[in-house]
Each structure stands twice: as C-alpha cells, then as structure tokens.
Image (tube, rainbow, N blue to C red):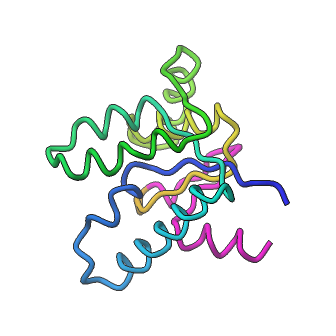
C-alpha cells in the first residue's frame, strides 16, 4: 500500500492546544494525534512549507511554537516560496480562499499532496482541483477504509 502524501494546515497543528470542551474539537484533536502517530511511523508522507514557518513564527505562545516547529523535522519534503507558488496562490484566492490559506494549498498541490487536512470550516467548504480538502476525522475515515 502506498503512503498518503499529506499537508496539515496550521490550524490542525494548533488543534490540541484549543479548549477541549466541545466534542467536535476533542474528536478532531484525537484524529490529529492519530495522524501524528502515522507520520512518525511512516504511514503518511508529510509536506512542510515556508507558510508553516511563517504562521508558526507569528504565534505569541512559545510552547505552541516549539511544539509545532518539531514537525518541520519530520516532514518528508519542504516547500519553499517561489513564483510558481505565489501565482498558484493568487489563482486559489479567486475561489474565495483567504491569501494565507491559498498559499498553503498551493504548496500542498505543488508537492503532489493527495490531502490538505484542516479544521478551518471555511476551507472545508472549498473545492480546489488536484487535492482533497478534509478535516482530520474525515481523513482517517477515508484512508482507514481503503
């Protein structure tokens, strides 16, 4: 079985730090932690990008920054900024996606990711050619059944 190539949105990395009082947030956290185990175990090939670096550096919380920053070292591939990424990001914004999110998606598509995993409700309602945008729970549901 081939490994799934994935890209996790920064909000997904942050999910375990959110207040866990809502069942949806707890379930997404558990799913994200399951995905992390899969990344560490080699079941998933994860891509990290310059946008992760940028957004993570903006966090005012040192504990979060350090914890999330560790994942860069576990990525199979790194996506730097480029003119191609910026152009692709601009096209994606025309679909109603916010600029930072569009650049994340452009990085994922550029590196051939099958899945863009996010907890952002607005992004989950978008369709971008060449990649499936799913929340962590649906990702597990889809990949565990195949």
Q: Say above or below: 140 vs 73.
A: below
Q: Say above or below: 96 vs 21.
A: above
Q: Quadrant of the N terminus?
A: bottom right
Spot the residue most to the top.
83
When asked about the image quadrant of residue 14, the answer is bottom left
When asked about the image quadrant of residue 132, the answer is bottom right
Magenta highlight on residue 124: yes
Q: Nearer the viewer, residue 97 or 10?
A: 10
Residue 44: x %, y % from top left: 66, 55
Left or right: where 128 falls relative to 55: right
Look at 40% across and 72% down and name the residue there: 29
Residue 90: x %, y % from top left: 49, 27
Look at 51% across and 61% down and name the residue there: 36
Q: Nearer the viewer, residue 55 or 85?
A: 55
Residue 96: x %, y % from top left: 45, 44
Magenta highlight on residue 24: no
Left or right: where 3 falls relative to 120: right
Q: Quadrant of the C terminus?
A: bottom right
Look at 56% across and 47% down and name the residue there: 7
How many labels were placed on the picture?
0
Look at 53% across and 54% down and name the residue there: 126
Spot the residue most to the front.
41
State which region is magenta.
123-146
Residue 30: x %, y % from top left: 45, 76
Left or right: where 90 falls relative to 29: right
When asked about the image quadrant of residue 77, the answer is top right
Spot the residue most to the left.
60
């Amino acid at each position: 079985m081939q490994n799934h190539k994935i890209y996790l949105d920064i909000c997904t990395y942050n999910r375990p730090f959110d207040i866990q009082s809502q069942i949806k947030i707890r379930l997404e956290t558990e799913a994200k932690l399951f995905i992390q185990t899969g990344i560490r175990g080699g079941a998933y090939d994860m891509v990290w990008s310059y946008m992760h670096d940028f957004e993570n550096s903006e966090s005012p919380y040192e504990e979060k920054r350090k914890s999330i920053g560790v994942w860069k070292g576990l990525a199979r591939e790194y996506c730097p900024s480029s003119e191609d990424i910026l152009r692709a990001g601009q096209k994606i914004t025309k679909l109603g996606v916010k600029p930072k999110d569009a650049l994340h998606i452009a990085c994922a598509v550029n590196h051939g990711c099958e899945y863009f995993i996010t907890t952002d409700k607005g992004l989950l309602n978008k369709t971008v050619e060449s990649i499936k945008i799913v929340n962590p729970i649906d990702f597990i549901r889809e990949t565990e059944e195949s």
